Amino acid sequence: MEIVQKTLYNKENINGRMFPLNQIDNVIREVKKVIYGKDNTLLWVMLSMMAQGHILLEDIPGVGKTTMALAFSKTIGMKYSRVQFTPDVLPSDVTGYSIYNKETGAMTYQPGAILCNLFLADELNRATSRTQSALLEAMEEGQVTVDGVSYAVPKPFTVIATQNPTGASGTQRLPDSQVDRFLIRLSIGYPDADAERDMLLSRQGDKPLDSVRQVMSLEQLQQLQRRTSAVYVSAEVAEYIVALVSKTRTSPLLARGGSPRATLAVMSMAKALACAANRDYVIPQDVQSVFCEVMAHRLLLSDTAEAAGQQPSTILKGILQSVPAPHFQKQW
């Protein structure tokens, strides 16, 4: 993440007053009113939204996952919806359902919680696998299907799902197919002493969340997403991404490497980083900056790596060092 910060905030290379960096700074500045000392995490969330990806927050209770999601929705003017998942939550609670309308004699669709701009799936791993799967269509295709009829979710659309890595009693492990649909997995973690002190001092009057202002519109976020999508990736950089992901499939430390969806995810996040740095093309450094964060939750360690206590991040850093980066030259 240090590379990401240097890329974005090196004033010798980036003019902080230029679009879109100034907009991103404004959003993060507002969210920092309620989330202290976690600038890196906030930046990753913003980049994920720019890349039109979904976010998995794996963390202990009480560190601000819900507050962060609500703050982002307020500062961007997003329609926000939250479901606290428990074993009795039904798929129809997420997707909606049809009900008979006696006045028209037809079935009328009642929208579910998923029809919003920012959907917080709180403790998704406490839902049944059937309810968890109700999210898949919306995350992948941007629509839900009820009684054979498809309904588009609003745009922009982001899912932030949370799960508690401890206290697994009564939980359903997220299936690999669903985990792979999240662009990135993040952890907020405990704040340091200074940040926690500031948090205490900020809560002596009005609620800090009440002070969060809208500084970006939905249309502006969609403009950022379109600009991110249009970022150019050269053949050399594309080959570099493929080489890195392919290395995860042949590593003896990994029983399962990255899928083609993972390859696309690395490219999408690298494009978001380039866009945030006011470039319309991806450089190898962008790929290096996002590779570990985008890939870590998609891998399955081999028995040898498990026994040795290896971590996915360590293996991915080794892959980055073993694959030579191309000498990039802008080609237009």
Image (spheres, grey):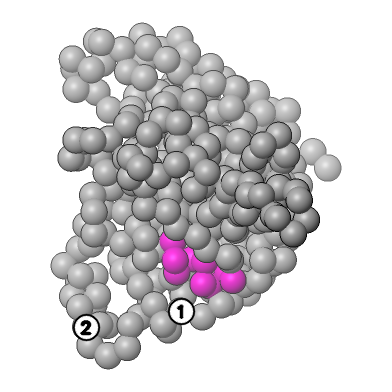
Residue underneath mark 2: 201
Instruction: Describe the element under mark 1 as helix, strand or loop.
Output: loop
Question: In the image, residue 120 lies at what x, y percent?
Answer: 45, 54
Q: Which amino acid lies under the numbered mark 1 shown in the image of this protein?
A: Val
Is 271 on the left or on the right of 203, as rendered? right
| Residue farthest toward the right in the current orientation of the protein | 332
Q: Position of residue 99 (x, y in %)?
A: 63, 49
Q: Position of residue 258 (x, y in %)?
A: 49, 22
Q: Which residue sits at x=41%, y=30%?
A: 129
Q: Is residue 76 above or below residue 178?
A: below
Q: Is residue 199 visible?
A: yes
Magenta region, residue range: 69-77
Name the residue rendered at 24%, 23% in the picture: 310
Q: Quadrant of residue 53?
A: top right
Q: Which residue is mark 1?
A: 212
* Image quarter hosting the C terminus: top right
203 is within the stretch colored magenta: no
- The amino acid on which the numbered mark 2 sits, given as a three-letter code, is Leu
